[in-house]
Image: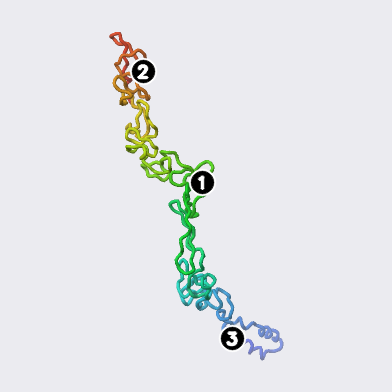
Amino acid sequence: MWKNQHLLAMALCAGAISILGMGCELIATVDRSRIPGDEGVTDPCADGTKNGEETDVDCGGPTCPQCATAKACAEADDCTSGFCADSVCCDTACDEDCDSCAAELKESGDESGTCGPTKAEAACGEATCSDGVETGRGTCDGTSVECGPGEEKDCETFACDPEENACFTECTEDAHCTLCHVCGEEGECVLAAAGTTGRGCEADQACDAAGACKAANGQECTEAETCGSGICVDGVCCDTGCDSACQACNIEGLEGTCSNVAAGGEDGTDCSGANVCNGEGACGLAPTEDCTTDEECASGNCLNSPGGTFVCADFPAEEEP
């Protein structure tokens, strides 16, 4: 339409009076290449220049034809082959760890557009870290499309950093340390104390002095080696040696913690017969036994009896809660 209007204006100018000459001169200077449909318009997809949204010269992008292999691309739709790898149109998907489609990345150095093995020693894969072992990126060998294994490194006392996929190299909290280790004052990981719970062990386990998980205090045992604390007393793993008279580690509700035997209770050969426990970890004469001083009695009270002798008093009755 604009082209026809322009031609009409030029035709009218041909017969116009001189007073209109200036206006006709202006019409004649209009840039015809900007008039849609005019012969001066150039196709941007055929101008021999990479412009607009083209991915290569006169091809690719949302408006130009698809590119042939070896041409530059941004996505598969840019290519007639339907494959875009290493930013060039490729003959195949070329998506293994150690294959490439760009000439500068291939071991052979062949022209771009044909998939082939990646250069030897090129890094491939991703670094990982799990179970206290850091594995670096692998390398290509120049012949296979498989990624060779990366170098492994033991994290030793540190744990894996999940954000970096590498070993922590210093700590600010216990979580930065490996099994049965805690963060020390200088940012290094040190062994947790024997009997420490948590730190990677199961709920019924505790750390031993060598950094391994064993039975926690209160768990049944027959020998000390099976306990995290390294102590087996009264058939359970215990927090201390618990070898004083009137102390036990298997008291109901307190299993695993060395505690005083209740007042009036016995403690085997250490405190039996005429003696009973005083509730404070020591033996004393049982109630009704003859005595001469309060200190001799488990109850702490030596009383004059009706017969004129002194006997240990009974334990005070427990107060109602």
How crowded pointer 2 is (Cα within 10 Å; few <14, some 14-19, many 20+) is rated as: some
Q: Provide the residue designation for mark 1.
A: 171
Of the image marks 3 and 1, the number of the one nearer the N terminus: 3
**Residue 3, how many percent across, how many down?**
59, 85
**Residue 64, how many percent across, how many down?**
52, 77
Q: Classify mark 3: helix, strand or loop.
A: loop
Q: Which quadrant of the figure has residue 199?
A: top left
- Colouring chosen for the image of the structure: rainbow
- Depth order, front residue of 321/244: 244
Q: Residue at x 53, y 41 (%)?
A: 185
**Residue 173, how many percent across, how many down?**
49, 44
Of the image marks 1 and 2, the number of the one nearer the N terminus: 1
- Depth order, front residue of 148/100: 148
Q: Provide the residue designation for mark 2.
A: 300
Q: Residue at x 46, y 63 (%)?
A: 148
Q: Classify mark 1: helix, strand or loop.
A: loop
Are the residues at dot 3 and dot 1 in contact (C-beta closer than 8 Å)? Answer: no
